[in-house]
Structure formats: C-alpha cells, structure tokens
Amino acid sequence: VWRMATVFDAIVCDPPYGVRAGARKTGCTKEAKPIPEEHRATHIPGTVPYDIKDVLIDLLDFAAKYLRPGGRLCYWIPTTTEYSQDDLPQHPSMRLMYDCEETLSLKLSRRLITMLKVKDMVDGEKSTCAMSEAGMEPAHDRFSEKYYGLDGSGGR
C-alpha cells in the first residue's frame, strides 16, 4: 500500500492576516470554463479571498499530513482580547503544546501557537474549529476590520 511520506520535523510560519493586503488563493467565484490549449501557457488563474480561518484550517491539515509524528507546527495568529483557545482550529493528529501571547495594543495581540503531531493522520480526517462550528466568530475572524477599527471598536 502506498502512503504519503511525512517529510518535515517542523513547520514554522507567520500566515497572512489580511491586514495590509488580503490573503488570496487560486479560484473563481463563478463556474470555471476549460482553458483552450493555445491559451494555457499564458493563462493567469483568477483568485478569491482567503479568510484567515480557512488559512489556519488548511495549515493544520497540511501539518497533519506532512509532519512526522513528534514534529512541531509553530504559527502566529492575530487575535483580540476576546480570544479563547476554542478559537484555534483542532486536528485529531495534533495537540496544542504552547499558546504564548504578544500584546500589540490594549485590544489586539498575536499569539504564537505550538502544536505537536501525536499520531499519523487517518484518511478523511480534517481540521475543525469549535467556535465556527458553533456559529460563533473566532477572535481572529475579520481581524483586519478590528485592526483598522472598521468593526466599530475604535481600532488600535
């Protein structure tokens, strides 16, 4: 049976928050049409917004797939004073080790999250976020609006 190799001991990153420039990923908002062969070499695919909560879910799924057991995922997450650990996405193969806060202002901070891969990923396992699944908004959701005070909070 062929299996995907776990190739990394650690993944350390600072994912885009969408503060200065919104994160984007390849995609389109309408039904995709096939690209004619003669245009494929010069075709530039469209992009769509990539919300921070989706970036973090994809990051955890990637780490669960490619980290070796015992490997670490370390990443920064922007947040507000309403933060709780329920804001963090979870994956069955990963366990939270450390959650360290760096205060940026009276209302805003960022947290350095360190997770440990505790077991090999099982096909079909996906990351989830308890807050989002409960219909609530994680503290990092719409962070750029909170950063610039567009949510009515007065900003920084």
Image (tube, grey):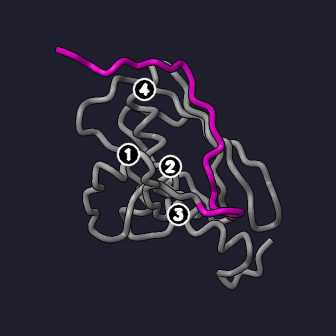
**Label 1 neighbourhood size at 10 Å, few (<14), some (14-19), many (20+)?**
many
Instruction: Give the residue pinned by disc 4.
Output: 66
Give the amino acid at mark 4.
Tyr
Instruction: Give the residue pinned by disc 2.
Output: 56
Where residue 105 appears, as percent x and y from the top left, is 83, 63
Measured in 3D between alpha carbons, the distance from the residue under mark 3 to the one under mark 1, in whole angstroms, is 15 Å
Q: Give the magenta-colored segment's residue range.
A: 1-22
Give the amino acid at mark 2.
Leu
- Tell me the element at label 3: loop
Q: Are marks 2 and 1 in contact (CB under 8 Å)?
A: yes
Give the amino acid at mark 1.
Ser
Magenta stretch: helix, strand or loop mostly: loop
| Quarter of the figure with residue 113 | top right
Measured in 3D between alpha carbons, the distance from the residue under mark 4 to the one under mark 2, in whole angstroms, is 15 Å
Give the amino acid at mark 3.
Pro
Closer to the observer: label 1 or label 4?
4
